[in-house]
Amino acid sequence: MDTYINFQAVEKRYGSFQAVSSFDLIIAKGEMVALLGPSGCGKTTTLRMLAGFVPVTSGRVHVGGRDVTQVPPYRRNIGMVFQGYALFPHMTVEKNVAFGLEMRGLAADEIGRRVKESLARVRLERFADRLPKQLSGGQQQRVALARAMAINPDVLLLDEPLSALDARLRHEVRAEIRQLQRELGLTTLLVTHDQDEALSMADRLVVMNKGCVEQVGTPSQLYERPANRFVAEFMGKSNFLDGSIEGPGMFRVQGGPLLACAERSAGPASCLSFRPERTHVAAAGQARGDGHNALEGTVALFTYLGPVIECQVRVDGGQVISALLPNSAQTATQGLELGSRVQVSWNASDSRLLA
């Protein structure tokens, strides 16, 4: 990996409170990495330590081979897009984008060229004379992005950049940001609590919890092979069955039957996990054949979610399993109704043993 950003044992403490603990991460040139986790997990603090807005308690931060741990923010050449955009309301779009360039003392013709180029990248040239209040939320976000890119940053930081947008705009703007990032080859660190946003935008994800890193990997690695129950729960919906390992590839459900699992646990595991979209529901007694685990239970709930229908089944023993069924009038819930006896099944290869 061509190292460009390097966090080395970085920590941040506020008195006795440990906000970030022993944070190690290498980011390659041109890579987009997402810090993902619940509120208060330390992801924004980590981002701001890279920007220089928050001093590091211990550890080192390198960018492009240069130690920037003690370098002030204005000398790091880092562009940042804030959660609330942070546009100046009394300035036009053009003036907002030019602000950082003026602070650097660039010549007027160079400022004009860069502003025009940045607004063209986000398709806002014709809005140059407008005030922020005359723009939609999506347009304001693109102005903030243009301002960050106008300084030709070495690194782009995105702090919850889409949280203020509605669902449709979030989908649209995240695709635009990802396309721009790839075209320009910008090394980018994204902070988000939205796993869909992280999965769709980042090359790699860093899941954080209580100031610590739980797992680092590609979107598919974290989704398909979570390191523990916290990661599995955070990276989309999962089914969890409590119990214990009873031999290689065998898991005993608490107070229930023995189930097969294709993987072997590297350590103690108290939980078997599998995804709802890999789960099948059929009338009781309709076995799916070899290689599948099966449990019987009662349909407890149907939830209409548009493209899919979620079916929750309370299996014998009391635990609840969720299945996402394709929304087909002919097949999705045929023969199933609340209170009916059903069989829930999934492929043993889709099972994961988790601590």
Image (tube, rainbow, N blue to C red):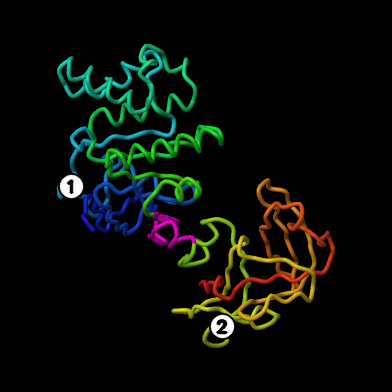
Magenta stretch bounds: 205-223
Which residue appears farthest toward the bottom when viewing the image?
247
Q: Is residue 176 above or below residue 297?
A: above
Name the residue carrying label 1. Answer: 64
State the image coordinates of residue 150 (x, y, percent, origin top left).
Answer: 26, 27
x, y percent for residue 131: 41, 14
Tell me, yes or no, whether the two marked residues, 2 and 1, touch with CB atoms within 8 Å: no
Q: 80 and 321: which one is in front? A: 321
The residue at the point 22 percent across, 39 percent down is 154
Q: Quadrant of residue 259?
A: bottom right
> How far across and down, in percent of the image, does residue 203 sit?
37, 52
Q: Amino acid at mark 2?
A: Ile
216 within the magenta span: yes
Classed neighbour count for the residue bearing mark 2: other residues with Cα under 10 Å, few (<14), some (14–19), many (≥20): many
Q: In the rendered structure, which disc, 2 or 1, sits on the residue that comes first in sequence?
A: 1
Q: Which residue is mark 2?
A: 245
Q: Residue at x 45, y 34 (%)?
A: 173
Q: Position of residue 124 (x, y in %)?
A: 38, 21
Say left or right for 124 vs 327: left
Marks 2 and 1, how far apart at CA: 46 Å
Instruction: Please check the rendered image and state whether residue 346 is part of the magenta-colored stretch, yes or no.
Output: no
Labels in figure, total = 2
Q: Residue at (38%, 24%) from the top-left corner?
A: 123
Does dot 2 land on a helix, a strand or a loop? strand
SS assignment at label 1:
loop
Callout 1, which amino acid?
Answer: Gly
Mark 1 neighbour density, 10 Å: few (under 14) some (14–19) many (20 or more):
some
In the image, 71 versus 77, the foreground residue is: 77
